[in-house]
Image: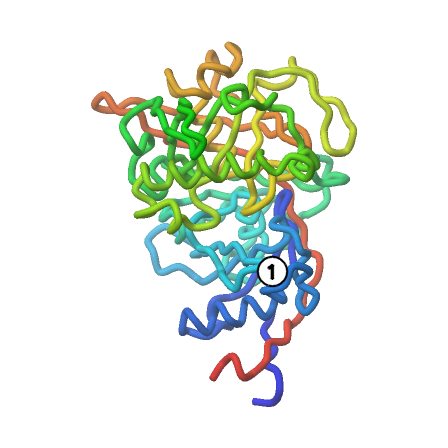
Amino acid sequence: MGEYVKIPALLMRGGTSKGVYLMMEDLPEDAALRDKAILAIYGSPDVRQINGIGGADPLTSKVALIAPSKRENIDVDYTFGYVGIKEAIVDYEGNCGNMSSGVGPFAIGKGLVPAEEPITKVRIYNTNTKKVIEAHIPVKDGEVITTGNYSIDGVPGTGAKIVLNFLNSGGSKTGKLLPTGNVVDEIILQSGEKVRVSLVDAANPAVFVKAQDIGLTGLELPVDTETNPHILEIMEDIRTTAAVMMGLAATKEQTGPAVPKVAFVVAAQDYTTITGSQVRAGDIDLVARTKALAVMHKAYAVTGGICVAAAALIPGTIVNEIVSEQAKNSNIVRLGHPSGVLDFEIELDEQDGRLNLTKAGVARTARPIMEGSVYVPSCLFI
């Protein structure tokens, strides 16, 4: 076997995230050995990930595992993993919508899906949430198009527009769009203070709180958490409490690092992004801030954004209380995040007195960065 095993890999940016895309068949069948191999690829656990491809940032420590699907009317199965940086863990609890945008191009490039001009539809089964994503990938001359004039905030330059439709994504982990059956719940913080929250499960489960209810403006940026670590502490307190209420963990201490998501929201207003550009209140419907593992997200996760947008259109939720009237009267929600704006098209319907999220659409870009082999110590396969 030699000192190392070479595993075929494609390093790709998907949306505002970056990670390696691997074929499941090229990894060990045993789940524990597979995770050891993935950790070795990224150089984890290590705060710098110096011995692997990880970029020492939650947005670049993600992995996509792909396999041909045997499911009816599905092209590929896709498993997403958050790769721990300081911890030796690969977390599969939730999906990443940004990384999802690279699955279609990867599948076409691998010959798993025939290329059809001008748009190839790739039906993806996400094993994390057991939900279907329909990706519309631009194609020309049998190849995926990656260059174009579509831009997304948080990524320099432009690229080809990829449309992702998350189908019937309500109840991704809990089985219910509203896990507790309530649009608003009350929780008690470690400080003893009571706050109103909304627990929603759409694409990924999340808990929402008004920024002013926890002493924040709602316009905080990642850099602000360095001088005020209390921001992350209170977000984690809310997140782990919500996990127990949703049935995602037996205790706060047993809550996984990635799910549920947590966000604080505020009504639309002018603010400055992490790059110094200005976002105007009239161009957005609300402002939200969330966490990526142990740090504030520099942009906003697509699946987390779907949950925000869905919550914004569910009457009575915390998010619905602050979202613009324009959003309430349409199916488009424009979310202001630390890097700019993210738009979602949300379709909700009511059946037997119960709201269902039938479709959530978002546009992204993606591009391959490097293709070849990653070297993994052969001893990990024994």
Q: Which residue is mark 1?
A: 20
Along the line of sight, the residue nearer the viewer: 57 or 120: 57
Residue 203 coordinates in the image, percent (x, y): 42, 39
Indicate the secondary structure of the residue bearing disc 1.
Answer: strand
Name above or below for residue 296 compared with residue 35. above
In the displayed structure, would residue 341 be above or below residue 139?
above
How far across and down, in percent of the image, does residue 368 sit? 67, 55
Image: 322 above or below 373: above
Q: Position of residue 350 (x, y in %)?
A: 29, 22
Task: Say which of 224 and 79 sits in front.
Answer: 224
Q: Residue at x 61, y 21 (%)?
A: 217
Front-most of residues 53 and 46: 46
Residue 365 in view (yes/no): yes
Q: Quadrant of residue 157?
A: top right
Residue at image location 26% in from the left, 24% down from the top: 354
203 sits left or right of 234 in the view:
left
User: Does residue 125 appear in this view?
Assistant: no
- Residue 2 location, x and y as percent? 60, 89
Quadrant of the drawing holding the N terminus? bottom right
